Every structure is written in C-alpha cells, then in structure tokens.
Amino acid sequence: MNSNLFDLEWPPRSGRTQQFPEIDDARWFPLEVSRGKVVKGQVAMLDALVALIAGRS
C-alpha cells in the first residue's frame, strides 16, 4: 500500500512542517465484518458491489 502524504505543522505552533501518510493501515475483511467497519454512508456502496458481482455469475 502506498499512501498519499499530507503536510502538517508539527509540533503545533512550531513553524516546522512534516509529512504524514493519509492512510497507515489497510486490511481485507469478510463482507459482513466490513459492514460494521465502514462509515454508515458507505454500506450502500458495499451492497452495490455485491449486486454487481452477483450479476456476473
């Protein structure tokens, strides 16, 4: 996984800017576990993906 970086003044009010990764961890989960981990608004995307995959069978 290669994450994008963002700049942040750190430590606060120090005048020094450092770069940090937007994402520091990526994992694969079974569908039902994923439903409990994603933001509520993303559940519909999971449902649409399942429907798309089911249509290819």
Image (cartoon, rainbow, N blue to C red):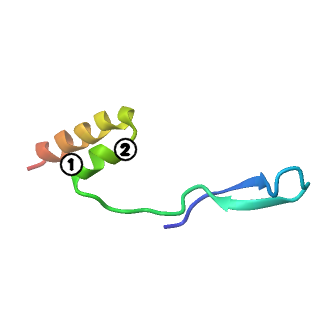
Residue located beneath label 1 in the image: 32
Question: Is the residue under label 1 in contact with that under label 2 (CB below 8 Å)?
Answer: no
Using residue 32 as the reference point, say whether residue 18 is left or right of it.
right
| Residue at x-position 43% and y-position 62% | 26
For label 2, count other residues whose C-alpha is less than 10 Å away and answer few (under 14), some (14-19) or many (20+): few
| Residue at x-position 48% and y-position 67% | 1
Tell me the tag on residue 7: none
Q: Is residue 7 above or below residue 42?
A: below
Q: Name the quadrant containing residue 52.
A: top left
Tell me which amino acid carries mark 1: Glu
Q: Residue 13: x percent and y percent? A: 88, 50
* Alpha carbons under labels 2 and 1: distance apart: 11 Å
Residue located beneath label 2 in the image: 38
Work out whether mark 2 precedes mark 1 in sequence or the reverse, and give the earlier one.
Answer: 1
Q: Residue 23: x percent and y percent? A: 54, 58
Q: In this view, does 47 lie above or below 25?
A: above
Q: Is residue 19 above or below residue 31?
A: below
For label 1, count other residues whose C-alpha is less than 10 Å away and answer few (under 14), some (14-19) or many (20+): few
Name the one closer to the observer, 44 or 11.
Answer: 11
> Hey, which residue is sitting farthest bottom in the picture?
1
| Residue at x-position 48% and y-position 63% | 25
Using residue 26 as the reference point, say whether residue 37 is left or right of it.
left
| Residue at x-position 37% and y-position 44% | 38
